[in-house]
Image: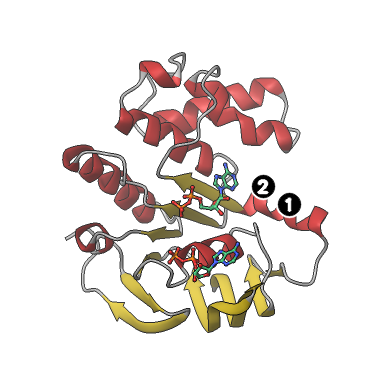
Amino acid sequence: EAAVTLEDVRKTYQVGEPVHALDGVSLEIPRGSYTAVMGPSGSGKSTLMNLIGCLDTPTEGSVVVNDQDVTTIGDRKRTKIRGEEIGFVFQTFNLMPRLNARENVALPMVFRGVDRTERREHAADVLDSVGLGDRLGHLPNELSGGQRQRVAIARALVNDPAILLADEPTGNLDTETGAQIMGLFEDLYNRGNTILMVTHERDIAEHAERIIHLLDGEIEEIEELSGVGV
Ligand code: ADP
Ligand code: ADP
């Protein structure tokens, strides 16, 4: 069963000469799979992530997230799907500086209307599952880079999304901290989460099950890797 399916997706930007950011991409991301996306600058990686993340819609073709075709629905419904089915993790963490770890993680549940007690409890549970059970009350600037990224990952997971989208999740971290985050992704994968990450580092990409290589808006190759985390 697919978490996300793209069928013949095209995204064309018309600023003077048209640019085909994605030029006929078909792709199935199975539930529980771990995929990396690589490709040179301008190959369409961000465009792909934005389309799967329901931040943008394709010029042609369809994007199906958790059995819902997000290209034919309205903006409102798409925003709802983005909030409930997509977990975003960014290189820059994007945490709210005045909210502590628990409050940052609880935020996506506020938009879903979960009551306060349940929000607090669930946020604490998810932080515990990423190894931050003893940092609930810390503000982002009281945490290390790796801990901030863990908070961002916990926040991305808190609504139990169909897919976790990670854009250079280790990009701002030193090698050792990056390796810890990859260890955490491996745990998440082993627990059944679906992960799609963009990275320009081959070593990082090799933690996934497969690497999608993009070139000029097309899939150049899908490389199947032998073991996860090796
Ligand atoms: P990558 O993430 O691999 O660097 P992008 O998806 O950001 O690639 O970009 C793919 C192509 O689409 C590039 O040629 C880029 O210039 C173009 N592009 C991306 N976003 C826009 C936009 N908002 N307006 C016009 N062109 C864009
Ligand atoms: P880049 O790929 O150039 O490093 P970013 O990782 O900052 O860019 O962002 C990737 C895409 O996600 C951009 O299109 C950006 O607008 C969008 N984005 C960034 N932060 C958020 C956020 N907190 N919520 C939703 N979308 C975001």
Q: Quadrant of residue 181?
A: top left
Q: Is residue 94 above or below residue 120?
A: below
Q: Which residue is mark 2?
A: 83
Instruction: Report the side of 221 relative to 175 (left or right).
Output: right
Residue shown at 66%/34% (left/top)? 109
Q: Quadrant of the N terminus?
A: bottom right
Where is residue 121? Give x, y as percent.
Answer: 56, 24
Where is residue 152? Give x, y as percent.
Answer: 46, 36
Q: Is residue 142 above or below residue 201?
A: above
Is residue 168 or residue 149 the one in the foreground?
A: 168
What amino acid is labelled 1 in the image?
Answer: Thr
Q: Quadrant of the C terminus?
A: bottom left
Residue 135 appears in the figure: no
| Secondary element at tag 1 | helix
What amino acid is labelled 2 in the image?
Answer: Gly
Q: Which residue is mark 1?
A: 79
Where is residue 155? Give x, y as percent.
Answer: 52, 36
Instruction: Give the class, few, some or many, for how many residues have Cα within 10 Å of label 2's Cα (few <14, many ≥20).
Output: many
Q: Is residue 222 above or below residue 204?
A: below
Q: Circles 1 and 2: CB distance less than 8 Å?
A: yes
Residue shown at 70%/55% (left/top)? 81
